[in-house]
C-alpha cells in the first residue's frame, strides 16, 4: 500500500528529546516500510527519519513548539498540502484529532476532513473528555465515515459513539531500552513540569518517604509561572533534584537505575508511554488510578495502582517485591513495535478494502 503518515508539526520525527507522538510515528513508519509498504511521512523541519521505502516531506521549516504562535498556520499548510496530494495514497493516517481540522476560512468554519475522498484514519493521542469536542463529534455526522483509532480503552470511552473505532496500544523498541535488575535508592519523575502531571504530588512522596527524587523534565513556556511559584522552592538539590530535559541515552540511564517511577497524574492520561519505558528497563511504576493506568500497569505485578499520595508512599515501600524481569516481560508481551505495526497494517488494509 501507499500510505501517508502525518505527524504534528510541533516536534521533529524522530524527536530529539520530548515527543511521544513523534516516537510512535517514527516506529510505525519504519515498521510498515520494512513490510514493503511505500510510506510518506509528512512532518516538520528538523525531522531526520530516513529509511528505504520512506519519503520525508517537511511541510514547515521548523518545529512549531518553539514558535507556538505560528502552529495553526503551519497545521493548515500541512493539511492543504496533503489534501492536494491525497490521490497519491491508498490511505492517509493523521496523528491528529478531528477538531484540529476546523479552520475559519473566509469567515466560514470548515472541517478540512470533509474534503478528503481517499480513506482516512485518525489516531487520537490526546484526551477525549473535553465536552465541547465530544458534542461537536457527536453532531458532526460527516466525521463518522472515518476510522478513529485510540491508544487506550479509557480514551475511546467518551467518544464510543463513533461507528468505526479501534484501540491500538502504543509501543516502543524494547531492544533499545537497557535492562537493569539492580536498582539505586532514588525515585524518578519523568516528563513535563505541569500541574496535571502531578509534579507536586511526586515531591510530596519524596518528602514523606525520605527517598531522593530526581526530576527529569522540561518546562514549557506556558508552565514557567507554575514552576517559579510552586515548584522551584521545593527543589533543594539533595532530596529533590531537577536535572532538566534529557536525551534518549540520559533518560534511559535514569530509568534503568531508579527504585521506582512515580506517575501521579491528575488527568485522564490517554496512554503514558513513560510507564512502558520504565517497565522496559525493569523499573516498577507507582501510578494514580487515572486514564490508561489500569490498562498498562498490572497491579502488584509490574507496579502499584494507587489513589492518593499516602498510598503512593506505601507503594514505594513495597517496590522490592516487584520483579524487574516481570516488568520487562510485560512490555515484550503487550507493547512491542511488531505488535503495533501488525495491528495498524491490518486496520489500514481493512479500511482500504472497505472503501474500494
Image (cartoon, grey):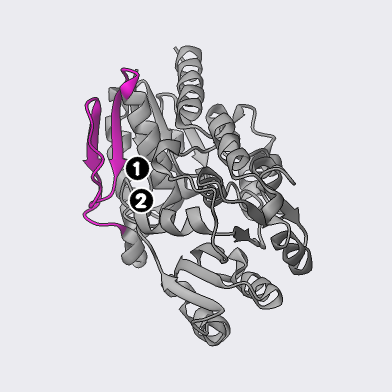
Asked if the stretch drawn in magenta spans residue 202, the answer is: no
Q: Which residues are magenta?
A: 34-63
State the image quarter where residue 337 is shown. Answer: top left
Depth check, front residue: 244 or 26: 244
Mark 2 and mark 1 residues within 8 Å of each other at the beta carbon: yes
* Residue linked to disc 2: 75
Q: Quadrant of the N terminus?
A: top left
The image's mark for residue 152 is none
Residue 188: x and y in percent read 55, 63
Residue 329: x and y in percent read 58, 35
Q: Pointer 1: residues within 10 angstroms few (<14), some, or many (20+)?
A: some
Residue 175: x and y in percent read 41, 37
User: SS for tag 1?
Assistant: helix
* Residue linked to disc 1: 79
Residue 327 seen in the current view: yes
* Magenta segment, prevailing SS (helix, strand or loop): loop
Residue 268 seen in the current view: no
User: SS for tag 2?
Assistant: helix
Depth check, front residue: 353 or 18: 18
Q: Quadrant of the C terminus?
A: top left
Amino acid at each position: 500500500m501507499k500510505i501517508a503518515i502525518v505527524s504534528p508539526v510541533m516536534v521533529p520525527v524522530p524527536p530529539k528529546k520530548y515527543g511521544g507522538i513523534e516516537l510512535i510515528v517514527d516506529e510505525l513508519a519504519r515498521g510498515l516500510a520494512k513490510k514493503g509498504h511505500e510510506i510518506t511521512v509528512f512532518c516538520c523541519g528538523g525531522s531526520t527519519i530516513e529509511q528505504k521505502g520512506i519519503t520525508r516531506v517537511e511541510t514547515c521549516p521548523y518545529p512549531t513548539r518553539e514558535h507556538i504562535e505560528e502552529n495553526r498556520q503551519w497545521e493548515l499548510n500541512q493539511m492543504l498540502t496533503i489534501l492536494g496530494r491525497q490521490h497519491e495514497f491508498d490511505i492517509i493516517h493523521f496523528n491528529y484529532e478531528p477538531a484540529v481540522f476546523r479552520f475559519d476560512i473566509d469567515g466560514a468554519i470548515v472541517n478540512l476532513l470533509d474534503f478528503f475522498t481517499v480513506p482516512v484514519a485518525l489516531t487520537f493521542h490526546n484526551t477525549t473528555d473535553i465536552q465541547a469536542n465530544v458534542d461537536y463529534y457527536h453532531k458532526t455526522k460527516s466525521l463518522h465515515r472515518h476510522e478513529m483509532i485510540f491508544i487506550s480503552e479509557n480514551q475511546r470511552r467518551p467518544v464510543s459513539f463513533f461507528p468505526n473505532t479501534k484501540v491500538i496500544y502504543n509501543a516502543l523498541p524494547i531492544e533499545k531500552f537497557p535492562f537493569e535488575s539492580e536498582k539505586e535508592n532514588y525515585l524518578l519523575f519523568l516528563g513535563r513540569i505541569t500541574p496535571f502531571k502531578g509534579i507536586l504530588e511526586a515531591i510530596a512522596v519524596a518528602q514523606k518517604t525520605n527517598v531522593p527524587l530526581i526530576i527529569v523534565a522540561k518546562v514549557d513556556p506556558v508552565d514557567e509561572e507554575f514552576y517559579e511559584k510552586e515548584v522551584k522552592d521545593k527543589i533543594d538539590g539533595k532530596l529533590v533534584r531537577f536535572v532538566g530535559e534529557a536525551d534518549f541515552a540520559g533518560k534511559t540511564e535514569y530509568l534503568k537505575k531508579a527504585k521506582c517511577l512515580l506517575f501521579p497524574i491528575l488527568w485522564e492520561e490517554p496512554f503514558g508511554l513513560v510507564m512502558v519505558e520504565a517497565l522496559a528497563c525493569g523499573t516498577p511504576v507507582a501510578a494514580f488510578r487515572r486514564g490508561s493506568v489500569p490498562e498498562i500497569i498490572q497491579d502488584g505485578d509490574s507496579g502499584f495502582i494507587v489513589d492518593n499520595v499516602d498510598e503512593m508512599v506505601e507503594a514505594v515501600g513495597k517496590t522490592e517485591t516487584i520483579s524487574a524481569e516481570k516488568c520487562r516481560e510485560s512490555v515484550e508481551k503487550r507493547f512491542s513495535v511488531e505488535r503495533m505495526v501488525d495491528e495498524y497494517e491490518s486496520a489500514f488494509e481493512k479500511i482500504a478494502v472497505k472503501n474500494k
